[in-house]
């Protein structure tokens, strides 16, 4: 749902456990809209006092995202140089962040752990969802629920036939369609949800907003390969 905090528009997830919070920025968050390149963007998000002032957050952690399937457990609070596309932790009041502008941030929570992962087509194909679920098991926890966040919808996500063929060789029932002009459209959201259900994860919450359709969100495809990114956070109290 949409939430205004001090004049800034955020998207938040309701119906979560009382100790779990999830929030995403928009391009109507003027408190953050002071970056114009990717160089200082992470620093502005992590150093800004807004979240610490209005929420119970001690630290915001962002990995160095590289479109991989690597997920890392956070044992130290300085992980900005960790080259991976997912973080998992059991620490309280530590927000795990993922930056997106058409890809999806998919979040997980269990009895003790939370995770936040970057799901573009490369990460999904490479197994980042499976790796996250396995890491929960390896750390003696289980996934209780998930959040599939903001991302590009199938109507806006035009892909090549070779990508559809690539996915079809690995996954069953790929959610795609071919339009009247012969272009292929992939639903990355439905693929993610289908994969979660294959692991018997049915408690799936959604921020069902398309980054390309909604003009209050950043979109890499729509906005001429913009460097600006949305920040999606999950943390536990």
Image (cartoon, grey):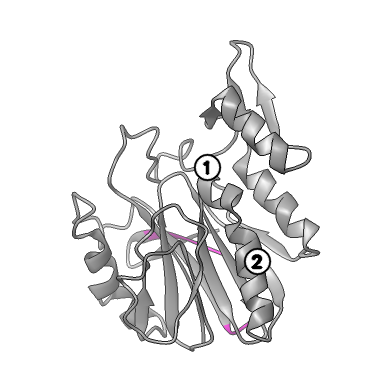
| SS category of the residue bearing label 2 | strand
| Residue receiving disc 1 | 210
Horizontal relation, residue 221 to residue 1: left or right: left
Residue 130 rendering spot, x and y as whole percentages: 66, 62
Assess whether residue 122 is covered by the magenta stretch: no
Q: Residue at x 63, y 30 (%)?
A: 164
Residue 134 rendering spot, x and y as whole percentages: 66, 71
Q: Residue 191, located in which quarter of the rendered image?
A: top right
Please name whichever residue, 17 or 37, is drawn nearer the observer in this view of the structure.
37
Assess whether residue 18 is covered by the magenta stretch: yes
Say if residue 14 shows up in the picture: no
Q: Residue at x 81, y 64 (%)?
A: 200
Above or below residue 83? Residue 110 is below
Q: Residue at x 31, y 36 (%)?
A: 225
Q: Residue 139, located in which quarter of the rendered image?
A: bottom right
| Residue receiving disc 2 | 146
Overall secondary structure of the magenta stretch?
loop
Residue 35 rendering spot, x and y as whole percentages: 19, 55
Say if residue 71 shows up in the picture: yes
The magenta region covers: 9-19
């Amino acid at each position: 749902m949409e939430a205004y905090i001090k004049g800034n528009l955020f998207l938040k997830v309701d119906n979560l456990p009382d100790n779990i919070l999830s929030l995403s920025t928009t391009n109507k968050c003027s408190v953050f809209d002071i970056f114009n390149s990717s160089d200082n963007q992470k620093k502005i998000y992590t150093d800004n006092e807004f979240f610490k002032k209005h929420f119970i957050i001690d630290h915001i952690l962002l990995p160095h995202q590289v479109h991989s399937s690597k997920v890392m457990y956070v044992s130290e609070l300085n992980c900005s140089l960790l080259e991976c596309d997912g973080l998992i932790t059991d620490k309280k009041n530590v927000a795990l962040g993922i930056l997106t502008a058409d890809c999806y941030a998919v979040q997980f929570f269990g009895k003790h752990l939370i995770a936040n992962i970057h799901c573009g087509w490369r990460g999904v194909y490479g197994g980042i969802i499976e790796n996250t679920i396995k890491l929960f098991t390896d750390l003696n926890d289980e996934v209780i629920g998930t959040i599939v966040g903001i991302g590009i919808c199938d109507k806006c996500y035009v892909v090549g036939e070779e990508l559809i063929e690539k996915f079809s060789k690995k996954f069953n029932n790929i959610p795609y369609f071919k339009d009247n002009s012969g272009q292929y459209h992939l639903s990355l959201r439905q693929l993610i949800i289908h994969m979660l259900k294959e692991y018997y994860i049915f408690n799936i919450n959604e921020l069902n907003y398309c980054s390309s359709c909604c003009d209050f969100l950043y979109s890499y495809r729509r906005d001429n390969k913009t460097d600006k990114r949305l920040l999606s956070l999950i943390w536990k109290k």
